[in-house]
Amino acid sequence: MKAQLISLMLCFALFLSFSTNLSAQGSANVTLLKQLDPYQQYNDCWGYTAPDGREYALLGVSNGTSIIDITDAVNAVEVEFIPSSSSTWKDIKTYQNYAYVVTEAASEMQIIDLSNLPNSATLVNTYTNFVTNPHNIYVDEQAGIIYGAEDFNFGQSIRMISLADPVNPVELHAFGNDCHDMFAQDGVLYVAEGVDGTIGIFDVSNTSVVPPLINRVSIPSPGYVHNVWVTEDNNYMMSTEETSGKTVKMWDISNLNNVQLLDDYLGPNDLAHNAHIKGDYCYLSHYAAGLRIVNIADPTNIFEEEFYDTPSSWGAWPFFDSGKILISDVPGGLYVVFFPGAVVTPTGIEDEVSVATEFELKANYPNPFNPSTTIEYSLGTAAYVQLNIYNISGQKVKTLTNATQEAGTYSAVWDGTDNNGNAVSSGAYIYNLNTEGFQQTRKMMLLK
């Protein structure tokens, strides 16, 4: 155990040594929208979408939390800074209109009210019932529970806390072996058990009792088991080990009593940090290799599809519907990038459905674009064609084609205006080709 901890500290010192002079760059489909570096020494990041649709980055800084409006990412601006105890480590999560922040500098959790954004945010309470200094937290939004990880507090490392009153949390239970990080969904808690080299799986469906252990998964030749994340259908789990040379692993968890290792992946710097899953992709903060986007559509054959390299990436948050992704970099601050695969197709618009291979909707070019982009499509036979542009809320913005056309290849130009000729705002948009028996959807980004 001691050797593992020493190895961990050496790895951490290694990634901190990377200089901000290293140039950040990405693959073809990942585009930098903005970098902000107003402070020194950053750590974690999280995102928040307000009820009015505005998007915010919650950026961990050594002495506080920076709240940044990234709705118009090119013109992103800090709207509030909430000071905290000074610490290298910080973790941030959200629930309803509140942000919860912990550091390893104090046995407390800050509660920040975000309801008055974009005007201001306010520290409304500080929860002080942790026994030791918490390292990570996880919010189960469905259950209204926040879990706190008290690293190395063996036997009571997990704090199960009710958010029935979000401003005044109440502890329900303390349990578990070593815990570094957690993920909860549909009544099951998955725990990265740190120096134990295992993943604990607990039944948390009944909050009135101490959660019983369902299974404990042993990792072959483990490193420091750092985090876990589960697919939306509860069939697969990814785990990271914060130890040089240890791979990110994909597991079949469809049977919690018989968990099977399916495949693994390791970024070019050999040191993974955190994994987050959204749709067919896992978004990895991979320290000196930056953001690594791994295709997990086939869980038995996972592979890196895209990346954005930064000097020392700590966190990556991909859950905005717009396709924006946050990257927090220890020396470099906040990077906001765009990846079309992270755009959430609005309800009611089918995504890439095809029944006739002679028909095709092609990728627009350029993408991202300003002020205009060209969309090409092919028709196998004569057809009545509709080519429409939608915003990410599913509202139709512009009709480019609405006519019967003969078989052949066509192109349409979108100039960033709506049907009334008004310029639209920068952001992610959906374009959809619809004919009788065929439709296909693609995603694009307008920058101004």
Image (cartoon, helix red, strand yellow):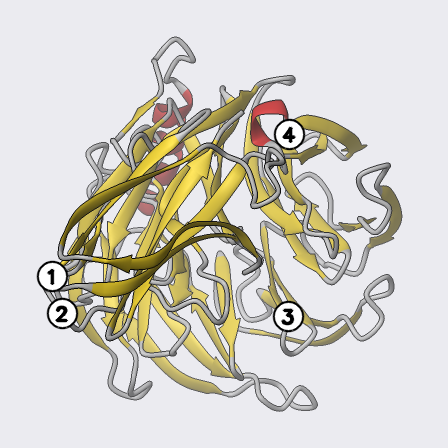
Quadrant where the C terminus sits is: top right
Q: Which residue is the site of mark 1? A: 380
Q: Which residue is mark 2?
A: 356
- Disc 3 to disc 4, how far (Cα)? 25 Å
- Disc 1 and disc 2 in contact, CB within 8 angstroms: yes
Residue 273 in sight here: no
Quarter of the image for residue 236 reads bottom left
Query: Which residue bears the numbered disc 3?
Result: 141
State whether residue 443 is above or below residue 29.
Answer: below
**Mark 1 or 2, closer to the camera:** 1
Q: Nearer the viewer, residue 421 or 395?
A: 421
Mark-to-mark CA distance, 2 and 4: 52 Å
Label 2 SS:
loop
Image location (x, y in percent) of residue 348: 48, 71
Q: Pointer 2 and pointer 4: residues touching (CB < 8 Å)?
A: no
Q: Residue at x 33, y 54 (%)?
A: 282
Q: Which tag is nearer the camera, tag 1 or tag 3?
A: 1
Cα separation, mark 3 vs mark 2, equals: 41 Å
Q: Nearer the viewer, mark 3 or mark 4?
A: 3
Front residue of this view, candidates 136 and 223: 136
* Alpha carbons under labels 4 and 1: distance apart: 55 Å
36 w.r.t. 399: above or below: above
